[in-house]
């Protein structure tokens, strides 16, 4: 379900609540019966926690118990880790051969998908690499096909053996950090829509061995780097400085910088006139609707 489709189903949510609920319930298996006329904490309790025994059948990927447990191990690691390829290996006694096979099955079942890295190879053919870098491999990232599956493997699946830890209060206390990934995705979608009339070469996150950037948009006419912050405080100039330093370190020649904030910006950022910086707030995301 797209963000726009989710909004059509729940048009009464304001943009902040819409982003939060979409980050949780997009992909919810009983979306047609979903009731959002309560507080988020109450909704999580009644629609997820109280229905765990029903919902967990939706996340059964194998009738063989040992394989099902291996699937759950991999998906939990992907949900709470850095989502890079190496995350699925070298833990919980899963060999690379077995993990690759399980990963392929999850990909074929459309549980997960891949985002290719745009990092350039370290070896340029001119100079030999330092010994410390010779074993370095560029890592793609793995994403869940829908948000509710990620929610399940962040908050529910790891705690099923001790259900007392699964409380709406514990979930709510971590929901901003959870929502931040979808806010990054929506920020990328917003930039792509604003430049939809150009030939777009690529957009999405950028990462390499040293850093990560939430947004790197490349079209025929412009290259944009951005950071998205889903936090309850205003973005200050140090975030902009950090973004610019990351781009410099990664040798990225950027035409424009974009910041996306849930809670607005400091007076310093608002007051200064920057020719090559865009400041996006929650109201700007209504354009995606």
Image (cartoon, rainbow, N blue to C red):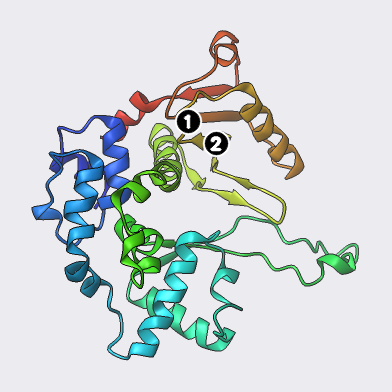
Which residue lies under the disc numbered 2? 227
Question: Which quadrant, please, contains the C terminus?
Answer: top left
- Decide: is 10 above or below 276: below
Which residue is painted at 76% across and 42% down in the image? 249
> At which x and y percent is residue 147?
33, 55
Residue at the front extreme of this rendering: 164
> At which x and y percent is residue 280?
45, 25
Nearest the viewer among 276 and 180 is 180
- Decide: is 207 above or below 54: above
Q: Residue 162 appears in which quarter of the rendering?
A: bottom left
Contact, CB < 8 Å: mark 2 with mark 1? yes
Which residue is painted at 63% across and 28% down in the image? 240
Which residue lies under the disc numbered 1? 260
Secondary structure under tag 2 reads strand
Q: Residue 47 appears in which quarter of the rendering?
A: bottom left
Nearest the viewer among 157 and 199 is 157
Choose the circle earlier in sequence order: 2 or 1.
2
């Amino acid at each position: 379900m797209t963000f726009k489709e989710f909004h059509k189903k729940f048009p009464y949510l304001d943009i902040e609540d819409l982003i939060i609920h979409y980050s949780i319930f997009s992909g919810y298996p009983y979306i047609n019966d979903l009731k959002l006329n309560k507080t988020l904490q109450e909704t999580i309790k009644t629609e997820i926690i109280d229905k765990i025994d029903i919902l967990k059948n939706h996340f059964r990927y194998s009738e063989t118990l040992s394989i099902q447990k291996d699937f759950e191990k991999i998906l939990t690691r992907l949900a709470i880790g850095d989502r890079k390829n190496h995350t699925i290996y070298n833990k919980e006694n899963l060999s690379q051969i077995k993990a690759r096979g399980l990963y392929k099955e999850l990909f074929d079942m459309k549980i997960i998908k891949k985002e290719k890295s745009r990092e350039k190879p370290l070896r340029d053919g001119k100079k030999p690499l330092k010994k410390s870098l010779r074993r370095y491999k560029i890592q793609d990232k793995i994403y869940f096909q829908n948000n509710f599956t990620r929610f399940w493997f962040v908050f529910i699946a790891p705690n099923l053996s001790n259900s007392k830890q699964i409380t709406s209060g514990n979930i709510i206390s971590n929901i901003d950090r959870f929502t931040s990934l979808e806010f990054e995705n929506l920020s990328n979608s917003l930039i792509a829509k604003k430049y939809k009339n150009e030939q777009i070469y690529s957009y999405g996150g950028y990462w390499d061995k040293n850093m990560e950037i939430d947004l790197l948009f490349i079209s025929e006419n412009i290259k944009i780097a951005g950071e998205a912050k889903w936090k309850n405080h205003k973005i200050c100039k140090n975030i902009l400085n950090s973004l610019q330093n990351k781009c410099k370190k990664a040798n990225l020649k950027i035409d424009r910088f974009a910041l996306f904030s849930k809670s607005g910006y400091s007076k310093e950022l608002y007051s200064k006139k920057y020719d090559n910086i865009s400041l996006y707030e929650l109201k700007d995301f209504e354009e995606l609707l």
